[in-house]
Image (spheres, helix red, strand yellow):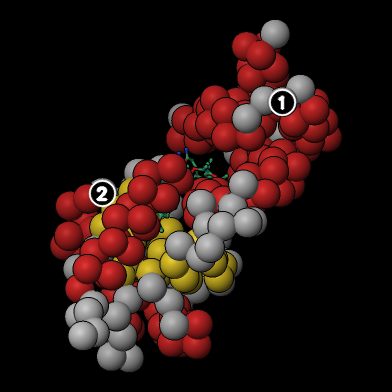
Amino acid sequence: MPGNRLSNMRQSIIDGAPETACSLAQEAVAAGMAPLEAINDGYVLGMRDVGEQFARGQMFLPDMMASAEAMRAAMSVLEPELRKQGAERPTAGVVVLGTTKGDIHEIGKILVGTLLTAHGFEVHDLGVDVAGEKFAAKAREVSADIVGVSALLTTTMRNQKKVVEALEKEGLRSSVKIMVGGAPVTRRWAEEIGADGFAKDAMSAVGLAQELMQKKLAAVPTQT
Ligand code: B1M
């Protein structure tokens, strides 16, 4: 039965069917399925299929938008469940998160933010199409430990470098760690632009954020 449920979830994204995606998520929560299993082994696989069909010219932009809508509908049910897991923990660190300038893809970034919150991080999500200066201003405002920048297009991943530069210009680079991610982003790219780390998916992003926090705390001189 869980196998069927997962494949129905996947299909609801391919079909661009928000109502089905939403009711499958509700059923899964009621049946005690882990929200992350539904996301990773059901809905995200549908999104991957959609991307592949789009790349082959078998699917068009309105279909892709309908699929994104279905994904958001499922996430509206699953996200609060994930957040509950982090609600009662002490803050693991302060993260400013956003999708880079020129880019409106947000599903992966939302997933990263949700999992960070579920693991005790205080997340300030700036949304999509965010300029480097805005990341830097928010980082200063909330005394961020980490700035996380998502990019889904090969053209907009270049703007991740602008975020690094904006933090340098603001004099924040030594106090703020930078992590980058998104489908076209690689470890090598992260190194090239001077970021502190790269994560390939949302769960790895949590591990990376924890690692960066440890490095940051280890660098703070202890008081005698
Ligand atoms: Co767009 N799109 N899209 N799209 N879209 C891609 C990215 C594409 C690969 C599709 C394709 O051709 N196969 C392609 C990019 C090609 C390229 O540059 N190499 C593409 C294109 C071309 C475009 C447009 C240019 C299309 C057009 O207008 N002709 C346009 C660009 C608009 C813009 O941004 N300026 C466009 C528009 C759209 C929609 C609006 C229709 C919609 C987005 C809706 C929304 O987000 N609200 C959309 C969608 C849905 C996709 C695909 C199908 C799915 C993206 C997604 O949500 N995946 C995508 C194809 C694909 O990726 N397979 C595609 C699910 C999500 C959970 O995964 O986002 O990868 P992902 O996030 C992962 C990891 O990457 C990682 O963790 C997440 C969870 O595991 N991660 C991080 C992400 N951010 C991270 C940050 C971190 C760490 C990890 O640290 C900070």
Quadrant of the frame with the C terminus: bottom left
Q: Is residue 134 left or right of residue 80?
A: left
Query: What residue is pinned by disc 1?
Result: 32
Task: Using residue 55 as the reference point, say whether residue 128 is left or right of it.
Answer: right
Tag 2: amino acid: Thr
- Would you call the spot at circle 1 few (<14 residues within 10 Å), some (14-19), or many (20 or more)? few
Q: Quadrant of residue 110?
A: bottom right
Nearest the viewer among 147 and 158 is 147
The structure residue drawn at horizontal position 29% and vertical position 80%, both measured from the top left corner, is 175
Q: Nearer the viewer, residue 75 or 20?
A: 75
Q: Is residue 203 left or right of residue 221?
A: right
In the image, is the residue at mark 2 within 8 Å of ligand 1 by its beta carbon? Answer: no
Q: Mark 1 or mark 2, which is nearer to you?
A: 1
Instruction: Name the residue beneath numbered marker 2.
Output: 186
Q: Nearer the viewer, residue 187 or 158?
A: 187
Residue at image x 41%, y 64%? 148
- Separation of residues labelled 1 and 2 (CA atoms): 35 Å
Check mark 1 vs ligand 1: CB closer than 8 Å? yes or no.
Answer: no
